[in-house]
Amino acid sequence: MAAKTAFGAMGVRDLQAGLAAKEFTAAEIASATIDRIQQSDKQMHAFLELTADMAASAAKKVDSAIASGKFDEVGALAGIPVGFKDNMNLLGTHTTCSSNMLANYVSPYTATCVEYTLNAGALPVGKLNMDEFAFGSSTETSAFGPTLNPWDFQRVPGGSSGGSAAAVAAGLVPVALGSDTGGSIRQPASFCGIVGVKPTYGVVSRYGVVAFGSSLDQVGPFARSVEDAALALNAISGFDEHDCTSQCVDVDFTANLAEGIKGMRIGIVPEFMEAEGLTDEVRSRITEAAQKLADLGAELVEIELEHAKAAMSAYYVLGPCEAFSNLARFDSVRYGYCDPGHTDLDTQYETSRSKGFGPEARRRIMLGSYLLSSGVYDTYYYPAQQVRTLITQDYEHAFQKVDCILSPVSPRTAFKFGEIGDPAQMYLSDMFTISINIAGNGGMSVPVGLGSQTNLPIGAQLISPAFKDVNMFRVAAALESIYGKAPIAPAFAEKAGE
Ligand code: GLN
């Protein structure tokens, strides 16, 4: 049998091949994974809660299926350890959204995306740290302390799904789920050097995932290979009657990974490549990636996204408005922290919400409340919706000319803790990712090597037309053939068995 610690470097296929060949059992995978997390995550702090018993009992089912010759029937993620962002309900676990508001909230049911993962035979190992209520790009807004970037503990892992990205990059789990409202899967994937997918809006149900911006939120996987991400997306996608935005998607996202990209038209957005704030090392990596895709037979086509520059402004109107509305339920009566110091209902709301929410959550709530107030609504919310339509049309026009778009994910590599204090500067982290949530297209981050200056991971963003996520997976596989699968962050490589 492989040394116990070696599971960390294995992907979905390796683990399943070992299980099928009876080299090890799912119970061994589960216990080794929990052990490794307990040993390796103390300082990094990707996990908020471990679910060792649940992992063990899921493993038992997989092992008994193997024993009775029915391994094939278990599901696409049979025996695969998976972690979940802590805004996803898993019956009996805490779902805190990394907020004091929900510090004691225990999931009364399981989110559909989590349930589908478990139905596919995965081993649930725990819940992962995030920015509070998914507001942020660094995990610094987590009420329980930040997650450290496994490549450099002085730096942020990105956010808001920073715990999910760090756990996968450190080899603690091969697959984790996150959510992405403006970039929260793609930016941390880029900062941690792994694959992160925000599928088209509607591909994955959000039922049971604590809502931030309901017209923008989408759930997706993190993995260290394009195929593993596609397999995970296969498992979690599909119709769910509990989410009225969910679509009947019956697509195999692995279907054309091996097809190559000959003849594909890949869009480049000159405005993105010339954007202020884009560092030279990121620009040159993305330019190089484009060239290499052309060498593999793709045709590069310059496209214009005329209104993308307004995406950030529109998002910071629409996002806070929706967050304000969604977070109204945390009123200390039905849900959330109740401050003992109150004297009547008004002060109960006031003190509980003031103390339960951190500064960034309060900022968004106040902003949303202001933007939706009468007299103000017409000035901001209404035009932001018009901008949204224009951005969506820009993408529709662009996708008449190209099959997929290539761009940077983030203007720079992972920054240091405390380096970006100004919220408006922090918001710029998502300058290349936000328009995709606004339009609803698919987007993903794929590693394209390290920066020449910082020596830190850089991700390329691939954007696909709505419900043609397979296009970006196809190009992602080509990038992976050039740059290789995501490595485990160097400081963790030995422990993970790489
Ligand atoms: N960083 C962006 C924000 O702070 C996006 C967050 C997200 O996608 N959840 O809103």
Image: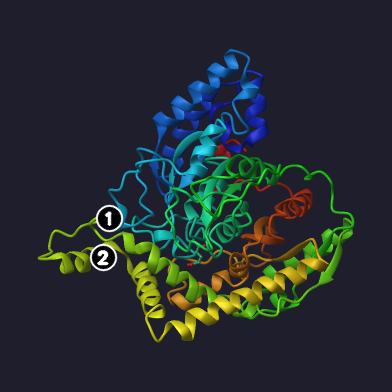
Q: Specify the quadrant of the image occupied by residue 190.
A: bottom right
Q: Which residue is mark 1?
A: 336
> Tag on residue 353?
2
Looking at the rendered structure, the number of numbered marks drawn on it comes to 2
The answer to whether 285 appears left or right of 318 in the picture is: right
Q: Is residue 487 above or below residue 13?
A: below
Residue drawn 24% across and 56% down? 337
Local secondary structure at mark 1: loop
Return the x and y of residue 218 as percentages of the image width and height. 55, 56
Residue 353 occupies quadrant: bottom left
- Which numbered disc flags the more N-terminal residue, 2 or 1? 1
Of the 4 image quadrants, the one containing the C terminus is: top right
Query: What is the CA distance from the residue labelled 2 to the residue labelled 1?
Result: 9 Å
- Measured as percent of width and height from the top left, residue 266 is found at 81, 63
- Is residue 434 depicted above or below 474 in this figure? below
At label 1, the amino acid type is: Gly
Which residue sits at x=42%, y=31%? 54
Camera-side residue of 135 and 152? 135
**SS state under label 2:** helix
Q: Answer yes or no: do the residues labelled 2 and 1 have beta carbons within 8 Å?
A: yes
